[in-house]
Structure formats: C-alpha cells, structure tokens
Amino acid sequence: MSLKVEGIKQAPLTICVTCDPTRGGSHVLGRNSIPETDILSTACAIQNMWLAACAEGLAMGWVSFYKKK
C-alpha cells in the first residue's frame, strides 16, 4: 500500500477516476440487466485514457483501491 501511495505523491499530475453506482438512476444503459456494468465501463474508460496517453508519448499508471463488497 505504501508503494502505491508513494507513486501517487511523486506524480506530476494525478487523475482520480471514481465509480458511484448510486448516481444516474436505474435508466443508465445496462444497469438493470448487469449490475457490474458501472465497474466494467469505468475500467474501459481508464484503458482508453491509458491508450490515449501512450499515443501522446505520455506515461500512465493504474493504481486501484477497489474493494470487493
């Protein structure tokens, strides 16, 4: 855990991506049939950010504090 936090402290820029399944209501596409849709969509968004960073010649790391319920 301390290694993860140390890397965050040293980064020149930090972006925090969060997922709150209580926001947006039940009308969000996919939420009614697959409850994990929010987490999966968040992971896809982070991967797209990572690919875009690489395309621009930037480094990016993914630090997850995900806690399964």
Image (spheres, rainbow, N blue to C red):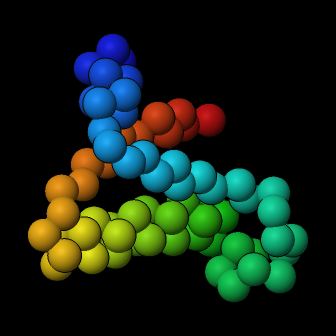
Choose between 60 and 45: the one closer to the eye. 60
* Residue projecting furthest to the top: 2
How many marks can you see?
0
The quadrant in which residue 21 appears is bottom right
Q: For the point 60% across and 65% down, which residue is it?
A: 38
* Residue projecting furthest to the right: 25
Is residue 21 in view? yes
- Residue 7 lies, in percent from the top left, at 28, 30
Q: For the point 24% across and 55% down, which residue is it?
A: 60
- Residue 3 lies, in percent from the top left, at 26, 20
Instruction: State left or right for residue 8 relative to residue 16.
Output: left
Is residue 4 in view? no
* Residue projecting furthest to the left: 57
The quadrant in which residue 30 appears is bottom right
Q: For the point 37% across and 28% down, which residue is it?
A: 9
- Residue 28 lies, in percent from the top left, at 75, 80
54 up-or-down from 9: above or below = below
59 up-or-down from 38: above or below = above
Which of the image's four quarters has the C terminus?
A: top right
Choose between 32 and 51: the one closer to the eye. 51
Which of the image's four quarters has the N terminus?
A: top left
Instruction: State left or right for residue 22 relative to residue 62.
Output: right
Instruction: State left or right for residue 60 relative to residue 15.
Output: left
The quadrant in which residue 52 appears is bottom left
Choose between 58 and 37: the one closer to the eye. 58
Instruction: State left or right for residue 9 relative to residue 53.
Output: right
